[in-house]
Amino acid sequence: MNVRNDTLATSVCKIELVVEIQPSQDMDRQHILLLGATGASGLAFLDAYSESAQKPKLTLYIRPRSTSKLPQWATNKSGIRIVEGNLDDEQALRTALSASQDQSFPAVTTIISFLGAYLSLQAVFTRDQSHPIADTFQRAILPAMKDCKVSRILVLSTPTAFSLPDEQKKMSWKWWFYTMIPLLLAPQGNAEMKGIAEAVVKAGAADDKLDWTVFRVPHLTDDNPHAKVIAGSLDRPFEGGTDLSRGSLVRWVLGEVEEKNWVRRAPLLGNA
Ligand SMILES: NC(=O)c1ccc[n+]([C@@H]2O[C@H](COP(=O)([O-])OP(=O)(O)OC[C@H]3O[C@@H](n4cnc5c(N)ncnc54)[C@H](OP(=O)(O)O)[C@@H]3O)[C@@H](O)[C@H]2O)c1
């Protein structure tokens, strides 16, 4: 994705933060719409949610055939609502973003997306770079979000989601090599990741009230969920590693929902 430099100057911060999550009084006023809840990161998010002291309301937007992937406890817990629908189902999206009729769920305040493509061997050979998920952001998710007056969105993407001249020049060889891997081995997944980031940044360029964060993740693992997360950029020596545990990722995301340190920015994350 090529994003203009003036957009990027405001998009990517040049500082690094080590984040430790503290429970907050404000989280119980949040209502989060989770996209990708049935994936490995989404399930890690539900684990972290179950442990958190202050629980936001949660709506899980799930493909109809995927509801069985959710843990049983999440399907009948008060404070969690499940809405079934495909990503291009505008009516279902609006339902998921709106307050419930009985007012037990207020309107959504924040969208979090852990959506992404599955690895496909076929795409390696065909060099498929289609991005159906990213297309639904542009066509359905972001417009529904705007209609429903939701102003905060945090989406998962990949380290090379942005073509930053500074980052490319100053990237270490280790990171340069690392960023080649998804390009070569996951062309379709990489296209989705870039497309999602591009759709969100583009929507933000057209609407300065859109508080977006694109968190760029390296190799995701199921290691220590409480590992420290470093957030920064690739345009200077980045102290985070090329691994990120999903547990630490989701805790970082939960912290960012309330702390808003990276609004209209695209931090690269890695474990210390
Ligand atoms: N693994 C890595 O090292 C790595 C590194 C960088 C980026 N990523 C990206 O990060 C994403 C998240 O990783 P993960 O391992 O947590 O996720 P994952 O287990 O691959 O789960 C993907 C999620 O996206 C949903 N999804 C996929 N295609 C969809 C579609 N067409 N419509 C609606 N939902 C769809 C899945 O829903 P269903 O359950 O309904 O299928 C699932 O909830 C990956 O998909 C990958 O592209 C991964």
Image (cartoon, rainbow, N blue to C red):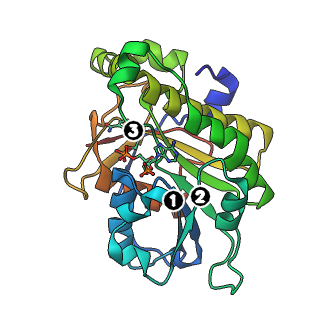
Residue 237: percent from left, percent from top = 35, 26
Residue type at mark 1: give it. Answer: Pro
**Which residue is labeled 1 in the image?**
64
Q: Is residue 212 above or below residue 15?
A: below
Tell me what residue is drawn at x 30 percent, y 34 percent. 239
Residue 231: percent from left, percent from top = 41, 42
Secondary structure state at the residue bearing disc 1: helix
- Mark nearest the camera among 3 and 1 is 1
Q: Is residue 239 above or below residue 252?
A: above
Residue 221: percent from left, percent from top = 24, 44
Distance of label 2 from label 3 (alpha carbons): 26 Å
Residue type at mark 2: give it. Answer: Gly
Circles 2 and 1 in contact, beta carbons < 8 Å = yes
Tell me what residue is drawn at x 39 percent, y 37 percent. 118
**Which residue is labeled 2 in the image?**
85
Distance of label 3 from label 1 (alpha carbons): 27 Å
Secondary structure state at the residue bearing disc 3: loop
Q: Earlier in the sequence, mark 2 or mark 3?
A: 2
Q: Residues within 10 Å of mark 2 (few under 14, many from 20)?
A: some
**Which residue is labeled 3 in the image?**
217
Ligand 1 position by quadrant: top left
Q: Residues within 10 Å of mark 1 (few under 14, many from 20)?
A: few
Q: Residue furthest left?
A: 223
Residue type at mark 3: give it. Answer: Val
Q: Earlier in the sequence, mark 2 or mark 1?
A: 1
- Mark nearest the camera among 2 and 3 is 2
